[in-house]
Image (cartoon, rainbow, N blue to C red):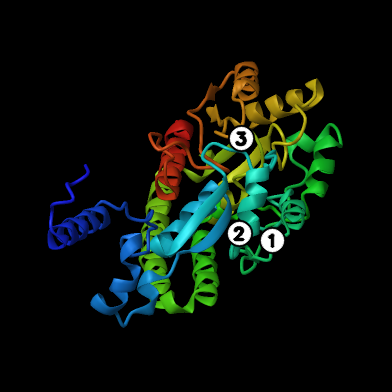
Amino acid sequence: MRHPFARSFSVLALLSLLGLLVACGNTPAAQTTPSATTLPATAESAAATTVPTTDSSAAAAPIKVVATFSILGEFVQHVGGEHIALTTLVGPGGDAHTYEPTPRDSAALAEAALVIENGLLFESWIDDLYTASGSRATRVAVSAQITPLPTPEGSAHTEAEDTHAEDAEDHGEYDPHVWHDVGNAQLMVAAIRDALVAADPANAAVYSANAESYIAQLKELDSFIQIEVAKLPADQRKLITTHDTLGYLAHAYGFEVIGTALGVTTESSDPSAGEIAQLVNAIRSAGVRAIFAENVANPSLMQSIADEAGVTLAPTLYTDALGTSDSPGASYIEMMRYNVTTIVQSLAS
């Protein structure tokens, strides 16, 4: 609105000042990050004198971290909390064995300070992705301090033909599914803590406290599993699954893996008629009541095998990935409790 020239200079000056104050008050704040304290963009110079602070880390941007798959992503988030900006490449329900990286993944690696990966060739695509992205992030394989189990050999699914054995060889001499032993999960969390402390020493105390709190929860989970498994007689602790993912669970808690449909990785081709026949015979010989499908693979193959063997296909387990937020496998602790409870109840006679 234009004012008449008869208005005095002092009135014009007052109106201009009021307009400036209103404009400053309506300026939108900058987009916040979990760890940043933000101020209106137009007030930055004033903030330096009116809001003094002795905590230089309070305004620091969170460090960018990439985790390769959902279970690791949850571990990283528990430790990093609000001081990290996390990108998880293979999300809930995704199969890291068969995952195909995207340009967005490459961009995330290029911007990251840390890349947290499982190791043991679980993410067969990560080397090429890292190189292609031009990333200079520090890579941390959280399985490095874990004593790995050898890749399973001689199961019913490998005796008929050599195709699954070749797949196992492509994925290394060690079983990468280390997180199914909760003791290993604690070592993974400790490795994540150490990596974050090294990358961001200003927040070392926070990372250490977060890790200690989460490890305490994992110890409780380990105790729960041992108590739950003890309900099942030892001679009934026999597992048949889609692929060889529960070797560490079996080793830690007293199960025996009788056989699998696909071998060590879901990248394997469907088993031949001869392999299926051998697996069915193994199921019958073991005298199990149920076999198990997994959330990272189509359950139709396991349903066919269950039908032919005359056993039940148990509720689907969460193995290489978390479930969605509304599922029994929404978190690692929920996933493990659900899996063990389902296994014990399904195998009980």
* Image quarter of residue 137: bottom right
Instruction: Say what amino acid the circle numbered 1 marks.
Output: Ser
State the residue in front, 327 or 270.
327
Percent position of residue 44, x then y = 34, 68
Percent position of residue 112, x then y = 59, 61
Between discs 1 and 2, the one toward the N terminus = 2
For the residues marked 3 and 1, what is the alpha-carbon distance in whole angstroms? 37 Å
For the residues marked 2 and 3, what is the alpha-carbon distance in whole angstroms? 38 Å
Between discs 3 and 1, the one toward the N terminus = 1
Query: In terms of secondary structure, where does tag 1 sit?
Result: loop
* Numbered badge on residue 135: 1
* Image quarter of residue 147: bottom right
* Numbered badge on residue 346: none
- Residue that sits furthest to the bottom in the current view: 54
Q: Are marks 1 and 2 in contact (CB under 8 Å)?
A: no
Query: In terms of secondary structure, where does tag 3 sit?
Result: strand
Residue 46 relative to residue 282: left or right = left
* Image quarter of residue 307: top right
x 61%, y 35%: residue: 241
* Numbered badge on residue 241: 3
Whether residue 272 appears in this view of the structure is yes
Residue 183 relative to residue 41: left or right = right
* Numbered badge on residue 111: 2
Q: How many numbered marks, from 0 up? A: 3
x 69%, y 52%: residue: 175
Vertical position of residue 50 compared to residue 154: above or below: below
